[in-house]
Image: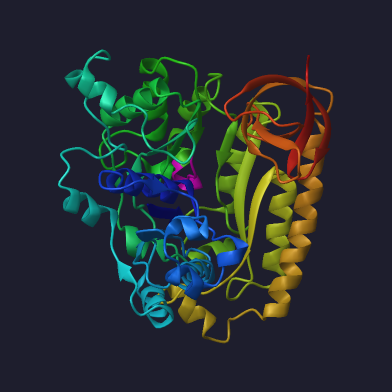
Amino acid sequence: MIVVLSQGCAANFGDGEKIARLLSKKSEVTFTFPEPTNATKNAANFENAASPADCHTEKPEAFYLNVCTVKGNSGALKLLRKAASTYPNVPIYITGCAPKDFREEAIRAVPKVQFTTLSELEKEQQLGYDSGNAIQDRTRYKKSDENFARHRNVLRESPFVGIVNIEEGCLDACAFCSTHLVKGRLHSYAPNAIVDQVQSLVDDGCLEIQLTGQDCACYGFDIGTNLAELTQRILTHVNGNYRIRLGMGNPRHVLGYQEALLDCFTDERIYKFIHIPVQSGSENVLKAMNRRHTAQDYITLANEFNKRFSKFTLSTDLIVGYPGESAEDFNDTLNILKETRPTVCNITRFVARPNTVAARLEASAAAVPDNVKHERSAILAEAFQKIALENNSNWIGDECTVVTEKPGYRSGTTIARNMAYRPVALQGSFPAGTTLRVRITDAEPFALLAEPIA
């Protein structure tokens, strides 16, 4: 058994599933950390056990840790140490967003750790196709053909969610970001291959298709197309019961085809959800970040989506404590939050990534003290949760169709998603992939509460 564990964004999870499919050619693969039982938590006892049965768990052949270091190295290092301490003699391979500074820390923590990439694994397997993500040519097979059938039932973390990586890299060089140092410049996948993949996943039972990448908004700029054209192509050519969730896109790119993208959302097969990260409401900070959009660009997009579609789910990201951020700059960020009223907001205290422009700023007198970062993030979080609760409260009393996703965090509950991709908590246990008609009975900042309609 090989263990593949992913962190971070949907694009990274998509790569993790590709890795799992490659490795499944030689062994069984799991996406879950194999926890020893209480009697065998001691790593030495596990190593000395006569057989896996003595431990009531299977010792992995290897770990593949598909890490994320966007917000720092601590999460990835914690996962590495857990794998190494629980199974000390099991090989560990690291892939994903692993810049130079993380690699150095990882080797210090676990000297025997090895590094690889998805491309290297594909070469090792010597596959003639991308095992699941820039898909088989469907003209080669008929559905009744044995070869086609063999490519069905594709290995995924969820049988009902298909992650489709539509591009890698980006067209930006944000001062705080280390991802572009790893992923490089934009490389978009061919539209026809993406359409083939989506149809294959829908045929395989996927109810949700996630189009993802480092920056979906610049998809196609290198091959003469864009995200709106790709989305319309999928809607035109892919038949079946599914909904598409569009991945993160930077504001400046979306502005170039804003109307065409808005038109896509009129189709009920598109979740009424968009993730447009603004990062700051201050023009001064945005310039220091080299974000290449203005606060007004984001406001324009947010207002258009909110005006065009009722109960639309707007998601954004905000960074507080960026080097040089003044009290006035922070107030601009607080104001943009209140004006655009997102229902999802990732609030992050600035952490310098080595070898970035922002790291050099952080080392200068421009650094914002940690206590100020904490204070500002707390103010933002409080304001955001108030807005999110008000947004979600607008759903109370509505009836809507949801698709169940996973067990809830509270015992005896199930999490589902509605047409705006908002999490809906249901009392009771329902199998994943179940379509239900529900009535919204209450709301919290991070979820709607509902009961099934008999």
Left-right relation of 89 to 411: left
- Residue lying at 39% horizontally and 49% vertically, measured from the top left: 16
Q: Quadrant of residue 128?
A: top left
Give x and y (percent) for residue 181: 34, 65
Instruction: Tally the numbered discs.
Output: 0
Give x and y (percent) for residue 347: 65, 58
Q: Is residue 252 magenta?
A: yes
Left-right relation of 125 to 421: left
Q: Quadrant of the C terminus?
A: top right
Q: Which residues are magenta?
A: 247-253
Give x and y (percent) for residue 11: 42, 47
280 w.r.t. 424: above or below = below
User: Toward the viewer: 207 or 182?
Assistant: 207
237 w.r.t. 220: above or below = above
User: Toward the viewer: 184 or 397?
Assistant: 397
Q: Is residue 73 visible?
A: no
User: Toward the viewer: 277 or 235?
Assistant: 235
Q: Is residue 350 magenta?
A: no
Left-right relation of 426 to 138: right
User: Toward the viewer: 91 or 343?
Assistant: 91
Q: Quadrant of residue 130?
A: top left
435 w.r.t. 167: above or below = above
Give x and y (percent) for residue 451: 80, 25
